[in-house]
Amino acid sequence: MASTTDSAAKSQDVAKIDAGPLTSSQGTTTVADVVVQKIAGLATREIPGVHALGGGAARAFSALRERIPGATASAGQGVSVEVGEKQAAVDLQIVVEYGVSIADVARSIRRNVISAVEGMTGLEVVEVNINVGDLHLPDEDDETSAESGRVQ
């Protein structure tokens, strides 16, 4: 009889372990996709060598949005996520600065995104996929500022 009691106690312990930090006997916490998306976007922007997030169209739309008074840039731009009950997967579209090691930047992004998402949400990040879609050249800023100063 003691063995059935021990096995029942062990199965309850396993259930508690498998439940994860977002589920308890007092309720369940659900984290929305947009929350994980914003955390991952902000964590990515913290890394030196990351110029911007998003593809060309998303960056163009963001540039237009910045010109509208009171509008703010989206923290989740260039980030897509899949969020389950216990795990999350993150896909990033980034633009890197010319001259940085893309491998080092990607490694730093993964480390920072995983740390931020897991620390803030309690979800396990199973993967962070990074797509480097463009390279920002230093003289690109000079060209855009010269164009914007041409007509006032």
Image: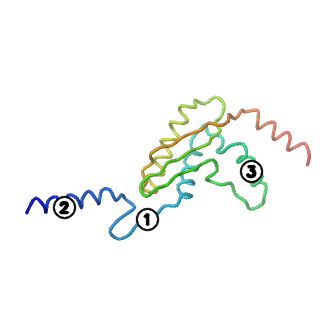
| Amino acid marked by disc 1 | Thr
Residue at the (19%, 61%) spot, across then down: 9
Q: Which residue is mark 1?
A: 29
Marks 1 and 2, Cα distance to the nearest angstrom?
A: 25 Å
Q: How far across and down, in percent of the image, does residue 27 sit?
A: 38, 69
Q: Which corner quadrant of the image does residue 67 belong to?
A: bottom right
Is tag 1's residue or tag 2's residue first in the polypeptide sequence? 2
Q: Amino acid at mark 3?
A: Phe
- The residue at which mark 3 appears reads as 61
- Position above or below: 62 against 137: below
The reply to whether dot 3 and dot 1 touch (C-beta < 8 Å) is no
Left/right placement of residue 71 relative to residue 88 reads: right
Secondary structure at numbered mark 3: helix
Q: Amino acid at mark 2?
A: Ala
For mark 2, what is the residue?
9
Residue, far left = 1
Q: Earlier in the sequence, mark 3 or mark 1?
A: 1
- Looking at the image, tell me whether mark 3 or mark 2 is earlier in sequence order: 2
Question: How many marks on residues?
Answer: 3
Q: Residue 1 got which mark?
A: none
Spatial separation of the CA atoms under disc 3 and disc 1 = 34 Å
Quadrant of the frame with the N terminus: bottom left
